[in-house]
Amino acid sequence: MGLGLLGRGIKDAIFFAKRGADVIVTDLKTEAQLESSISRLEGLNITYRLGEHCEEDFDWADLIIKNAGVPPTSPYLQYAIKKGKRIEMDESLFAEYCPCKIIGITGTRGKSTTTTLIGQIVEHNKELLGYRKVFVSGNLQGEATLPLIDEVTKDDVVILELSSWQLQGFGVNKLSPHIAVFTNLFPDHLNYYKTMEDYGADKKNIFLFQKKRDYAVFNKNNEYTRQVSIDAPSVVRWFEASDVPQDWQLKVTGQHNLENIAAAMAVGKILGLKKTEMQHPICEFTGLEHRLEFVKKINNIAFINDTTSTTPIAGQTALAAIKTPIILIAGGATKNLPLLDFAKDLTTKVKAVVLLEGTATDELEREIKNFNGAHIIIGRYKIFKDAIDRAYAQALPGDTILLSPGCASFGMFKNEFDRGEQFKRIVNQIK
């Protein structure tokens, strides 16, 4: 239920079809919208129900795999529940049958970076730690976890990035990873959740069902993680940015990345690693695509792709990480999150802002003007290339053009990754 465009649904469909199951893929998107995904399933015994869902498909199924983005309030899921159907999610179904230890990472910000860092630290030391293989999966772009069940053994370790939606499945099955990392919690997805409490409740599933000898790792400087740590039934460990030695020559910048590194180091310490054994993979880490990603310099003007900035706090984090004069590209679709603090930071930290059209942009523009920032708004655009061209026209040598929208991508783009790919393609065509 929900094939999607990022790859996880595709790999799950392949997994069941190759096992000989009868598979129906149902998605509210049309065949034309899903063309790139469907082409990867060619030759497999799969039936498609696209542009709609039908109750008869849910009647027919023995097992329903729910895409993470499908809300639990879906009338079709409610119908399936009444019918007593088994409803699962990729990661939690995998966790149920996984023969080895699982390290899980969640949080509003830093999940992907922390997950990847832990993976690189453990991979670098896997012989020392006695692991046969290290698998890194979960919510990372394009990764599907369930197919790994064919590969993992008891001598491996699995590291999973887990979104709040994916953790719904862990809650239903009363499962938690052996080591749980909770990076932070900020307002997000309030276009999906009714309240912050609902959002946080799903996140808490990462540690709620741990055993006494498991570990829960929390951010010492995030108010929410400090509060919920008292609910952990396991051994609690803490991390903060100051845990990272100041003399390490890091290739990533920003206070937020120090926190991500500290979280990864806390896991390494639980596994028995010394700082010296973690230093090399940490210092060689150059960051992830679409997250404060350096694209190129043209005429000594730097272009930075931070498209995964889909929340105001993410935009604020990016502004804090860059020390050169900034021309910001911001705005987009709403997540029903307050934009006041982002707008306030904008007016003090950027020399100009170019706005992208979207359901959040009226509010963002209004808040910028409320903080006497009308003069820094240099345009509002429906065409992405025009926005980038305007930013470049305004820039001087030594400036940074930063794509960090602080808003979701729906409308002008397929998703935030499409937004980042388009940004890089347009920038690379600038002469």
Image: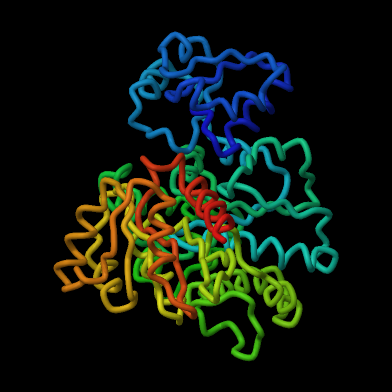
The image position of residue 25, as x and y in percent, is 55, 20
Give the number of marks. Answer: 0
Is residue 267 rendered to the left or right of residue 340?
right
Q: Is residue 113 left or right of residue 406?
A: right
The quadrant where residue 364 appears: bottom left
Q: Residue farthest to the bottom?
A: 247
Name the residue: 79% across, 68% down: 125
Question: Residue 27: x percent and y percent?
Answer: 47, 23
Task: Give me the residue at 66% from left, 23% from top.
Answer: 41
Question: Which image quarter: residue 323?
Answer: bottom left
Residue 157 in the image: above or below residue 253:
above
- Residue 9 is situated, as x and y percent measured from the top left of the image, at 57, 32
Q: Residue at x 29, y 52 (%)?
A: 197
Q: Is residue 422 left or right of residue 96?
A: left
Residue 102 in view: yes
**Horizontal relation, residue 283 to residue 164: left or right:** right
Q: Quadrant of residue 82?
A: top left
Task: Using the image as rendered, state which of residue 416 and residue 185 is in the foreground.
Answer: 416
* Viewer-side residue, 317 vs 240: 317
Q: Is residue 209 above or below residue 324?
A: above
Q: Quadrant of the C terminus?
A: bottom right
Q: Nearer the viewer, residue 232 or 417?
A: 417
Q: Residue furthest left?
A: 370
Where does residue 330 sit, x and y in percent of width and height? 35, 59
Mark yes or no: residue 211 visible: no
Q: How is the image coloured?
A: rainbow
Instruction: Give the farthest residue toward the front.
Output: 431
Residue beneath the point at 53% across and 50% down = 162
